[in-house]
Structure formats: C-alpha cells, structure tokens
Image (cartoon, helix red, strand yellow):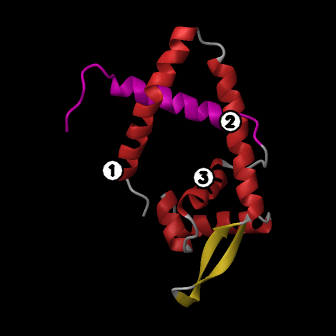
Amino acid sequence: MQQRASVDAGRLSTVADRLVRMHRRTELPGELSPARASTLYSLVEHGPRRLGALAALERISQPAMTQIVQQLEASGLLERQPDPADGRASLIAITDAGRALSRERIAARAVTTAALLDTLDADDAAAIARALPALERLASAADAVHPPR
C-alpha cells in the first residue's frame, strides 16, 4: 500500500479522533448514547436490518445490540417489521421519529462545526473546504476496506 510522505497519517488520525470527541461532547437533542446514535445513523444509511446483521454492522455483540434496540424501540425511534424474505424473522427499522431525531442531531452538529470554522482565518477555512472532497473519498475508501457487514 502506497503512503504519501506529505500526509502525516498519525496526525490526521489524531485530529479526526479529537473532532469525534468534540462531537460527542456537543449538546444534542435526544440524549442518546454514542452506541444508540450510531445505530440510528446506520439504519438511516443502510436501511432495515436483521438484529444480527445490525450488530455486525456496528461491530458489537448481539446481546448488546438487543439492549440498544429495545431501548430505542421503547423510545419510539425504532420498530420491528416482518422480513419479507423470511416470515419468521423481523427487520429493525428506523421510525419517522427516529429519522427526524437523526436529522436534528446532524443539524446541531453542523451548527457546532460552523461555529468552529468561524474561528479560523479565511485561508484555513478555504483549505478545509478544498480538502473536503478528498476527505469524503478517504471515508469512502475506509468503507471499502471495512465494509458494513
């Protein structure tokens, strides 16, 4: 695998981790744990899944996913639907309320990020804007290396 000398991968990884931690500390609607929020976002992105497939997608145990699903279901954010491929099984799907909460949380994070961007000078903000397409390609490459299960 080729590594570009001009990119400090460790530094990039550290910065990404710091931004993730900042987002986790951001006051967001819904008071969801990171695991519950990630489960909602996965269902928005990937659609309804069987419980085991959802656990694999989130890389957690099936018992842990069962707890998360039960909590989100009790909150009205998820629901079980019959699996059209197997009438004995069910799919975990996000509800309209879950989808709305996900949108609210994404919007709240965007406000926080915009406020941080406003603290940068014009050159730094422009550099980040220019880097976004490459960062999106990097995220897509990460999905290809570690695809959803």
Task: From the image, give the main secondary structure of the stretch colored magenta.
Answer: helix
Q: Secondary structure at mark 2?
A: helix
| Three-letter code for the amino acid on which mark 3 is drawn | Ser
Residue that carries the numbered disc 2 in the rendered image = 109
User: Tag 3 or tag 1, which sits nearer the N-term?
Assistant: 3
**Which residue is at a point 55% across and 16% down the rendered structure image?**
125
Q: Position of residue 90 (x, y in %)?
A: 60, 81
Quadrant (top left, top right, bottom left, bottom right) of the N terminus:
top left
For this orientation, the residue located farthest to the left is 1
| Residue 83 point in image, percent of width and height | 57, 83
Q: In percent of the image, x 20 and y 34: which residue is there?
A: 2
Give the extent of the magenta segment.
1-28
Residue 55, image x, y percentages:
52, 65
Badge 2, how many Cα within 10 Å: few under 14, some, many 20+?
some
Quarter of the image for the C terminus: give it: bottom left
Q: CA distance from mark 3 to mark 2?
A: 14 Å
Q: Earlier in the sequence, mark 3 or mark 2?
A: 3
Q: Which residue is mark 3?
A: 38
Q: Indicate whether 33 appears above or below 66.
A: above
Q: Residue at x 59, y 33 (%)?
A: 21
The answer to which quarter of the image holds residue 111 is top right
